[in-house]
Amino acid sequence: MNSTATTERGRRLLASVASDYEKRGYQVKVQPGVGDMPEFLAGFEPDLIATGSGESVVVEVKARREVENEQTLAAIEAALRNRPGWRFELVIDGSERDLGSLLGTPQIWTSLDEANELQQGGHFIASFLLLWSATEGILRLLATRENVDLESLAPGYVTTRLYTLGLIGREQYRVLNEALQLRNQAAHGFQVSVTRQDLANVTTIARELLNEVESKAA
């Protein structure tokens, strides 16, 4: 277990993440022991493992300062890579972040257009990273419009929180989760294959949610 989850705020955040998964029908093990984990996770001490229908999620809660040069995170991601039905979620404690202003909808529309231009030029990975950045901005705007209290701005946590509250649909949640795994691989320097269909799927959801955000602001 990392040091963030031993603080009072860290424990509250971990409990919130556990509760979100339990509400969705997952079996949750907080601070799992050796007997709760498969062989390929031997030696790791994740904060939480959530097991649901068709997938298991390994969750780590960390403060922003702990993420920099954190080799354990990369090692867990490597252990889960090519493990069908397993994924990794990093939840960053938002209390220590120097938060800037949220992107406005005009800026996000511009990013979506620029991502499309990159795709048309054959730059699929660059397009995907910019598209995901815009999508994160949309998710935060949606949370703000709906007065959702977010204890972390980690995209996996935000997506799960919005899905739990019924603010994004099941299929949207599935696509965004798959996209997040691609984003993590691309952003951290691992080999990744991004297809036109991947881009189209995320673009469709991003535009749907951004239109929804704008309608709520009207």
Image: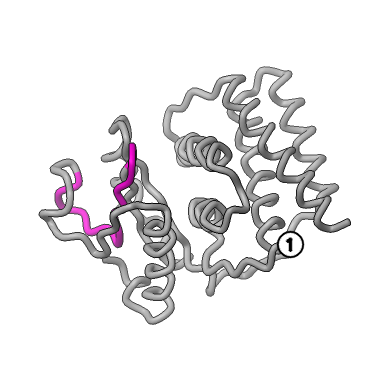
Taking the image as shown, residue 175 lies to the left or right of residue 42, namely right
- Count of residue discs: 1
- Report if residue 89 is visible in the image: yes
Quarter of the rendering containing residue 33: bottom left
The N terminus: image quadrant: bottom left
Q: Is residue 8 above or below residue 90?
A: below
Residue located farthest toward the left when viewing the structure as drawn: 35
Give the labeled residue for mark 1.
145
Quarter of the rendering containing residue 87: top left
Residue located farthest toward the right when viewing the structure as drawn: 218
* Residue 173, horizontal then vertical, whole percent: 53, 42
* Residue 123, horizontal then vertical, whole percent: 65, 23
Q: Is residue 16 above or below residue 160?
A: below
Residue 36 highlighted magenta (yes or no): no
The C terminus: image quadrant: bottom right
Query: Start and end of the magenta stretch?
Result: 41-55
Q: Residue at x 61, y 19 (%)?
A: 196
Residue 51 highlighted magenta (yes or no): yes
